[in-house]
Each structure stands twice: as structure tokens, then as C-alpha cells.
Amino acid sequence: MAHNKTSVLRGLLFSSLLHLTLSHAGVVFLEKGEALSLLKRPRRANKGFLEEMLKGNLERECLEEICSYEEAFEALESTVQTEAFWSKYQVCQGLRKSRTALDACLEGDCSVGLGQNYQGAISHTKSGIECQVWTSKYPHIPKFNATIYPNLIENYCRNPDNNSEGPWCYTRDPTVEREECPIPVCGEERTTVEFTPRVTPPAPVEPCEQQKGMLYTGTLSVTVSGAKCLPWNSEKAKEVLHGKHIDPEVKLLENYCRNPDGDEEGVWCVTDELPNFEYCHLHYCDSSLEDGNEQSEGISGRTVLPQEFKTFFDDKTFGSGEADCGTRPLFEKKKVTDKSEKELLESYIGGRVVHGDDAEIGSSPWWVMLYKKSPQELLCGASLISDSWILTAAHCLYYPPWDKNLTTNDILVRIGKHIRAKYEKNKEKIALLDKIILHPKYNWKDNMDRDIALMHLKRPIIFSDYIHPVCLPTKEVVQRLMLAGYKGRVTGWGNLKETWATSPSNLPTVLQQLNVPIVDQDTCKASTKVKVTDNMFCAGYSPEDSKRGDACEGDSGGPFVMKNPDDNRWYQVGIVSWGEGCDRDGKYGFYTHVFRLKKWMRKAIEKYGR
């Protein structure tokens, strides 16, 4: 029976082929190529059992003609593929008059209706703002989960909430949460919304001040907030200048803004209001941290004899701990190294890459968890710099796009922790704060410049094997260690992956650590459209590196530390600040440059630490 059915089928096929061949006007035989193409071309009979016997074809069934779900399934032979195709087909089938438009619609290159079919790569809004990556929380916290909406890819425009104006995205502008995108409409010469990019007039080219205003001799006498400067010979000014190293070459005339102490932030003056000093606005030239013709040679450049450690802060306002900073009780004081610090040293002199994961107990005794009281949750990382002061990122405390404006009443700090989700008796201490000081020029609107904040403990903390302060960098340490390719360490309890999922695999049990290389500043600037300043640096692995890793957003505010082999101390050279998604190709984590802001820290601590 099967043999007979096969014979009948072959006969029908032959008869059809013969009939089509003879029907050509005056042409009895086809050219070889034409004949082969005819044999390979599937034909459809509208009726009869031949259609049942031949395998369905999507091209003919659904694109050249209208098909049913069953016919699409027959062509695709897969429930998953059919479901995916059918959801698009139902949206796009009204475009049948234009095959080009239909194909573009099915491919997702243009928009139909509300644009749920759109799968293209447009990533800017109608006013020309770059879109935020859907899985990133900077600068806006997305309300749509890429795990639930798998088409939320990279920073491409999509319409997960059926927005009436079509596909949209969260924007990279902290002042604009979301905006629609100009997506081509299928079969029409228009876009879903009109593209009207914002025209920003080019900023006038200002002459820049060299050496952070150390040579400035102008008459500016008003601060960035508009406060009037006090004369340098006033009693208040004499009080502020007392004990500071003042460069005799800088002439303190009248009440003009000056930089007598070489502050990396530039010129400043004395004011009536606490903290009794404020910076003035000038445009500064980019500057390196190298002295004259001296070039940073790194660790391998020369042998350096250990120098006596010099304190920078006044312990009357800073508190205790600076003289003994960066020497961990369970490691350096016992002449023991932790399991991955060798990787850091080998990056200074060239060496292999090793993997780091869980931190050892007591290996980051300066690490601080900022904890929100209500609702109770991990807020950010921070670092202990003395028994009285904690350092973190300003955006952990104040960031309007996240409706964040926290006070000392909203948060507490947990110091000495290793296990994230439980209280560690005899190890951790829970402490309250009484002061929060944000950098006065913290720029959350544009680029997170000067993303730094100080927090004062209500009562000094007692040091232990698990609680110990980190050192703040000197110029010599920065010149010696902060070179491209040299590795620092970031720690935290942030997400291990760039995801919204809350499965246990994404919430680490113990403190995590990762060693990442510093990246040269030109590469940092080229990796982003955000303006990168001297107050930032970036770190992370390039796409070519076999090892990967970057500080995720949950680690914000935590320290980027490096070990100086010359004095065997750990220095915090950076604060985890911002990034464009975690561990993504061509993207790096950005950090606040602590040394650049160190003199602001001293001025603030001297006033608020009394």
C-alpha cells in the first residue's frame, strides 16, 4: 500500500512538472539552471492531498498569502517558533500590500501600533538623549524587570508598558527619567514621535588656571554658593589658617579667592558660615599628579626604602587610628598575607592572573555597611578612616532621581561584618551617626563629579581584629601605585551579576572581593559619553581579557584599596561611584579619586569634628 501511494505521488509530481514545462510558449526544454530551480521550488496546490503530503513553507503559506496558526505550525514544526512568529504575524499582517514593510515589521525593524513588535537597536530618545541600560540602576531605577521582559536588551528602545506614544527608554540624563524614542513606522515615511534633538550651544572656551589656582592673582571674592569672602586678615581667617602649611609665594590680599595650601579643589576663601571655608568658581586646566619632570615609575622602576609614615589629619578632630592605619590585625600585624593580595603585587611587576571570590575574615576590617533603618536593607558600602569618621559616596545619601535624601536619623552603620544576613556577635559593631557632610560641589546632575561624603560617628568605635581603619593616600602613594594595569581591590555585598533576580546565587552570603586593574584615563574617557574629570578614575577588565569582573551598583560607596609594598599598608585610593551596567564589554567601573579631594576632607573634618 505504501509503495502504491509513493508511486502515485511520484506520478503526480512528474505530470505537474511536464505540464509546466510544455506550457512555456514554444519552449520545449528548459535551460539547466532554470530546470534545477524549478525542481527545487516548492509548489502549493490549493486543494487535494498533495498539500497534505508536502512540507509546509512559511514563505508561501504566510508571507505571500494569508495563513492560519495551524498552517504556520505546519511550516515551522515547532510550538516555540510558531508562538514567537504568530505574535509578530498578528501585529504585522495588515501590511501585506508592501512585502518590504511586512518583512521589516516581522524583523522588528519598525513599529506597528504601539510598537510592541519593535526589536531594533535605536537607543536615543526624541530629544537626542542616550538611553540607559535596562539592567542598570544609574541614573534611574527601572520599574521593569529584564528577567520578566526578556526583550529589554542593552539600552534599546522598547515598550514594556504599552505606552500610547510607542517605544521609549530610561535616559542617561538624571533630570529626565524616561522619554519616547523616534522609531520608524512600518510602511510610512514617519517616526512614532518627531525627532527634535536638544540644541546645546557650545560652552564658551574659558582660559584655564594652571596648578589648581596656585598662581591665581585675580579679584574673585565670591564663593560658588554666592557667599562673600572674609578678608584674609580677619580673626576668623586667621583661625582657619592656623596650623596649615601655607605657601609663602601665594599672596593673601584683601578677601580675594586664593589657594594657599595647594588644595586640589582649587581656590577658596574664608566665610562666616560653617565650615567657615568654601571654594570659588574658576576653570582649571587638567593636571597630572607628577612633580615637574618627575615621572611615575611604579613599583618596578626603582627600589624605595621604607619611609616613616606621616599623619595628615589633626587627631583632635579626626580621632585616632591614622598612625596605625592600613595594617590589618589578622594579617600585616601577624606577618600573614591573604589569599589574593599576591595578585595585586604581581600586577605591579607583571605576573599571572588568579581568581578571587569570598573575602577572608578580617581581610577588609575597614569595610562598613550602611544600613537603612526603614525598610531595613543594605544601602551602600563605606569605609572606616578613623575611630570617628566614615567615608562613602555622596550618591548613597543624596540622589534625587532615586528620591534619596537621607539624614542621620535614616541610617546606621555596621562595622566589622563578614556575613551579610545575620548579626555577628563578638565581631560586628552597630553605630549611629550625628553628622553627614556632602562635598559642596558634588554634581549629581551631569556626571557624579566629586561623589564623596563624610559621616561622623556619634561615639568613637573601638578597634578590634575585625575593625580597623584604612589609610588615605599620599601623593607619593598615588604616583607609585595608580598606574594603568596595576590592580586594586573592591569589596562588597552587591549583586554578583547584573540582574534583578533575587535568587540566592545572586545574593552573596559573605563579603565579596575582586581585584581589578586600573585603566588609563584616555580609555576611560573614550568608553563613555559622560564627562570624565580629574576627580575620577576607572578600573576593570577589557573585552580581550580572560578574567572579568567589575564592581556592581550594589557596592556603591565602598573602597577601592591598594597595598603599598614599600610600607606594607593598605590605602584607599577610590570610592565606588558609578558605571554603565556591571561587567559589560567596553565599559568600566568609575571611582572617586580620593587623593584629589583629601584637602577638602581635612578642612571639613577640622570644622565639623570639633
Image (cartoon, rainbow, N blue to C red):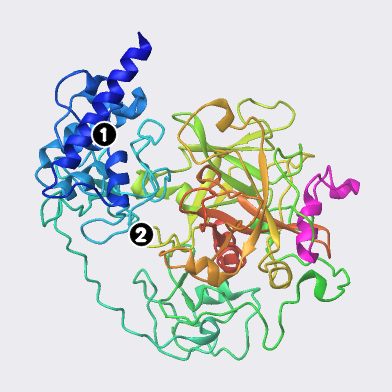
Callout 1 amino acid: Leu
Q: Which label lies toward us, 2 or 1? A: 1
Residue 158, can we see it? no
Q: Residues within 10 Å of mark 2 (few under 14, many from 20)?
A: some
Instruction: Choose between 161 and 596: the one closer to the eye.
Output: 161
Residue 548 position, x and y percent, is 62, 50
Residue 82 position, x and y percent, is 30, 27
Q: CA distance from mark 2 to mark 1?
A: 51 Å
In the image, farthest residue toward the top: 1
* Magenta range: 326-350
Taking the magenta stretch, the answer to whether it contains residue 335 is yes
Taking the magenta stretch, the answer to whether it contains residue 109 is no
What residue sits right under mark 1 in the picture?
58
Instruction: Choose between 114 and 257: the one closer to the eye.
Output: 114
* Secondary structure beneath label 2: loop
Quarter of the figure with residue 588: bottom right
Residue 46, can we see it? yes
Instruction: Choose between 7 and 259: the one closer to the eye.
Output: 7
Q: Residues within 10 Å of mark 1 (few under 14, many from 20)?
A: some
Residue 323 position, x and y percent, is 78, 58
Quarter of the figure with residue 543: bottom right
Q: At x 70% / y 63%, what residue is drawn?
A: 486
Instruction: Choose between 360 and 62: the one closer to the eye.
Output: 62
What residue sits right under mark 2 in the picture?
445
The correct choice, above or below, for 603 with respect to 547 in the image is below
Callout 2 amino acid: Lys
